[in-house]
Image (cartoon, rainbow, N blue to C red):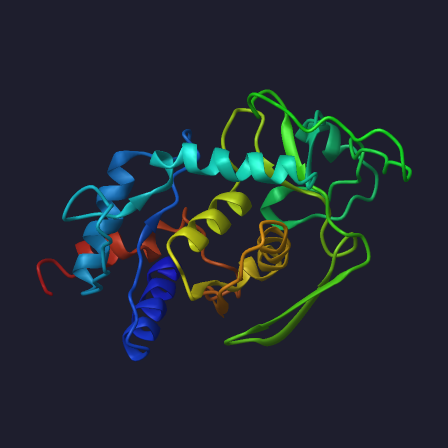
Amino acid sequence: MGHARTFRTAYERAREAGGVLVLRNEDLDPQRSRREFVDAFLEDLAWLGIRWDEGPDVGGPYGPYSQSERRGFYLDVWKRLLAGGFIYPCTCSRRELSRIAQAPHEGDEGPMYPGTCRPVPQLPGGPEPARESVSPAGVNWRFRVPDGEAVTFEDGHFGPQRFVAGRGFGDFLVWRRDDVPAYQLAVVADDAAMRITEVVRGADLLLSTARQILLYRALGLTPPAWYHCPLVLDEHGERLAKRSDALSVRAERQGTGNRQ
């Protein structure tokens, strides 16, 4: 229900602005992405009466864009970040990070990275670090945040936002060791390529916006506007999870039979 409500908000804001609504299937994780899930959310959106606009390169009349088909595009962005010296390889495992005493947590991404593999800054006139790599596979790649810098932006719903790099969030993943682009890199690359002027998503991604603004800056791109929706909560004030099947759009569809 939460995802459907957010997409409905995006739909209404695009229509009110006379804009184009883009539906993107963020299916980068091969372990969690299945064709039946895609078919299900397309059916749910159609049942809700939500329509989106499809670009000429979608590959068919039904869309949507799928991130799993855009790996080469993300690899080009990774190379640009590497050439600019913005990212570095990290060999730390999730288990190692979880053992760090008093490590603050960063939502679904686990503990804030302490900088274990972060390269030591070079002295003026010293040798430049190697910035060539054939493939990002085999290690995690992290974006080096400017410690102590405040990242600010205006959110269309929640107003002014401020996060301090190195305190509110640490060096974040842009490419995973299993050769899968990370969420932060992929959405920035896609939003820029698809000329997105406003991103509409859940309030749980407010912190991700600060990270993405740093990526936009590193790539020399102009960030879009942001509109974060309040989360849909259950009767206990807890965020609705995907496991809450009784509160899913599919369950509602089944409960109402063939009514449209």
Q: Position of residue 104 (x, y in %)?
A: 76, 48
In the displayed structure, would residue 155 be above or below residue 233? Answer: below
The residue lying furthest to the front in this view is 125
- Seen from the viewer's position, the closer of residues 236 and 132 is 132
- Asked which quadrant contains residue 153, the reply is bottom right
Taking 77 as reference, is 6 left or right?
left
* Residue at 41%, 51% in the rendered image: 193
- Seen from the viewer's position, the closer of residues 244 and 165 is 165
Taking 208 as reference, is 121 left or right?
right
* Residue at 79%, 31% in the rendered image: 128
The residue lying furthest to the left in this view is 258
Taking 100 as reference, is 32 left or right?
left
In the displayed structure, would residue 180 be above or below residue 196? Answer: above
* Residue at 64%, 54% in the rendered image: 214
Which quadrant: the N terminus? Answer: bottom left
Q: How many marks?
A: 0
- Asked which quadrant contains residue 2, the reply is bottom left
Taking 201 as reference, is 97 left or right?
right
- Seen from the viewer's position, the closer of residues 43 and 90 is 90
Which quadrant: the C terminus? Answer: bottom left
Q: Position of residue 108 (x, y in %)?
A: 58, 46
Q: Position of residue 39 (x, y in %)?
A: 22, 43
- Seen from the viewer's position, the closer of residues 119 and 242 is 119
Q: Position of residue 111 (x, y in %)?
A: 71, 42
